[in-house]
Every structure is written in structure tokens, then in C-alpha cells.
Image (cartoon, rainbow, N blue to C red):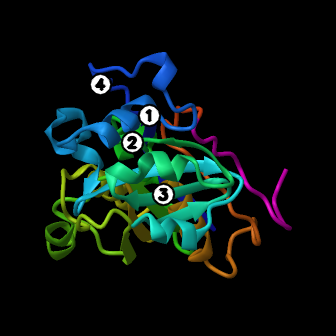
Amino acid sequence: MLFLLLGLLSFWGMAFEKTIPPERAIPSLEEALQILAEAEEPKLFPESLDLFRDGLVQVVVEGDSLEEEALSKLGGVIRFSVGNLWEVLIPPKNLPKLSALPGVRYVRRPARPFPASLSQGVSLTGASQWHAWGITGKGIRVAVIDLEFGGLSQAIAAGRLKRVIAVRDYTGQGMESGGGHGVACAEIVQDMAPDAELILLKIDTEVQLYQAVRDAMAMGPASSPTPWAGSTRIFTMGLASSAMRCATLPNKGFFG
């Protein structure tokens, strides 16, 4: 059985002070991105700093299709894709051309996750009594999907995380860059279910989140020793966004 722990997801609310006149606006391109595309020095915009990856802009394409060959001619590359969403890196000047490609409906900035607040729970929930009864998470895998895992290697070396079986960085920024929110989440899981196996996945956009969910489910055990064998249950921690909704995803053997 596999559990997924997700942080809050929220669209980037920062707005550019500059605006595009309505008669020049490109309907299929977010206004902030059109401003970047037309700027002589896009990186001078403070709001744009989190978009750049090695000189390219990180955007999300919504559409029916996205031709990789056409994108390549614009200097772009697809990093991840799921459903009708593509996470793309592209030179800022070519954003208008990207938005005009066949099958593209809208090009926008990525949704960015932010950490939820978590509290210690073993004593408050009485989990120690469950442990005494032998209910320790054995046979369970928990995927912790978060945007920061700073201090992970130290936590493993110190024995605070003993059951990490896989880690993956989707951001390209390094698994341990940023704060320690994801590590704290994993430590809480370890405290609550000391024999559960942990999968740690680092993301920073909603497309990466979808990909991480798919990969986590693929890494789930083929069978489970629990009475819920054959089921995969997704639990969300404070997921609050129209960008994504998670629910229980059953297959055969799911209990009602």
C-alpha cells in the first residue's frame, strides 16, 4: 500500500507592475510572460527570477498537443508532461511563438507549491499504543512529495530517517537545496510509522507534482500484506488548489 503526502499548492500571485495594452495582448500567453518576452533584459524583473533555468524560462503549456520538433526549433525542451500540461524550458524571446504553435491553448507561469504547517503527532494521536500492538507501518510505502529536502543526508546519517528507499529530484536544483520542510515531514512519518518505507520526491511546479505522483504509484509495492491488498490510497496533507485535486484512487480489492 502506498501513501502520498503532498504540500499545499498555490498559483504564483506576484504581478508585474508593467502591463500590455489590450490591443497588443496575446490571448494565449500570460501577460507577465509577454512582458518578459518583449523586455530587453528579462532578468532585470525581480518577479522573473524564479522562472529562469540556465538562461531559459520555465513555463507551463496548456493545450491539446505540443510538437517537440516545432518546440525544438524555438530552442525549447519539454521537461515533464502529464495529460494536457507540459513543463517547458524556452528562450524568453520565443514565448509568443510558443503560444502560437498548433495545439497550444495557453502558456503561463508554473504553479508553485509552498509548505504546509505540520506538528508533532505521536503523543497527541496515541500512536505509541499502536506501536505497542505491533502496528508500525510494516509493508507500507509512503511517498513524501515536497519542495525542499535540505539536511536530508544529515538526517539519514543521524538515524532520524532509517527507511528511505528512493529519492528523486525533479527540479534540477539539487535534492538538498532549500529548507528542511520535506525532511521534517519524512521524520514525522518515520515517528508515526517507524517500519514504513519512505520515497522522497522533490518538486517545484504542478507538472512535476503530477509526474511525481505517477512515479510514486509506480514505485508502490506489487502486493500488500494488509487486508486492503491491491489498493492504492492517496492521502493529501492540506492540498488546496484548483490546479489539482487528489482523491482515493482504487483498483481491484479496494475496500468500500
205 over 251 or under it: above or below:
above
Q: Which mark is residue 16?
A: 4
- Report whether residue 219 is seen: yes
- Report whether residue 188 is seen: no
* Badge 1 density bin: few <14, some 14–19, many ≥20, Cα 10 Å: some
Q: Earlier in the sequence, mark 1 or mark 3?
A: 1
Q: Which portion, as a residue range, is magenta? A: 243-256
- Distance from the alpha carbon under mark 3 to that under mark 4: 22 Å
Q: Which mark is residue 174?
A: none
State left or right for residue 203 relative to residue 212. Answer: left
253 over 204 or under it: above or below:
below
State left or right for residue 31 relative to residue 54. Answer: right
Q: Mark 2 sits on what residue?
A: 112
Task: Find numbered disc 4 in the image and state the secondary structure of the residue it sits on.
Answer: loop
Task: Find numbered disc 3 in the image and state the secondary structure of the residue it sits on.
Answer: strand
Q: Amino acid at mark 2?
A: Arg
Give how far across and how far down residue 253 sits, in percent: 84, 66
Q: Amino acid at mark 4?
A: Phe
- Distance from the alpha carbon under mark 4 to that under mark 2: 17 Å
- Whether pointer 1 and pointer 2 mark residues with C-beta atoms closer than 8 Å, the reply is yes
14 over 101 or under it: above or below:
above
* Badge 2 density bin: few <14, some 14–19, many ≥20, Cα 10 Å: some
Q: Mark 1 sits on what residue?
A: 10
- Distance from the alpha carbon under mark 1 to that under mark 4: 18 Å
Q: Amino acid at mark 1?
A: Ser
- Distance from the alpha carbon under mark 3 to that under mark 2: 13 Å
Q: Mark 3 sits on what residue?
A: 87
Mark 4 or mark 2, whichever is nearer to me:
4
* Badge 4 density bin: few <14, some 14–19, many ≥20, Cα 10 Å: some
Q: Earlier in the sequence, mark 1 or mark 4?
A: 1
Task: Find numbered disc 2 in the image and state the secondary structure of the residue it sits on.
Answer: strand
Confirm whether the magenta stretch covers residue 99: no
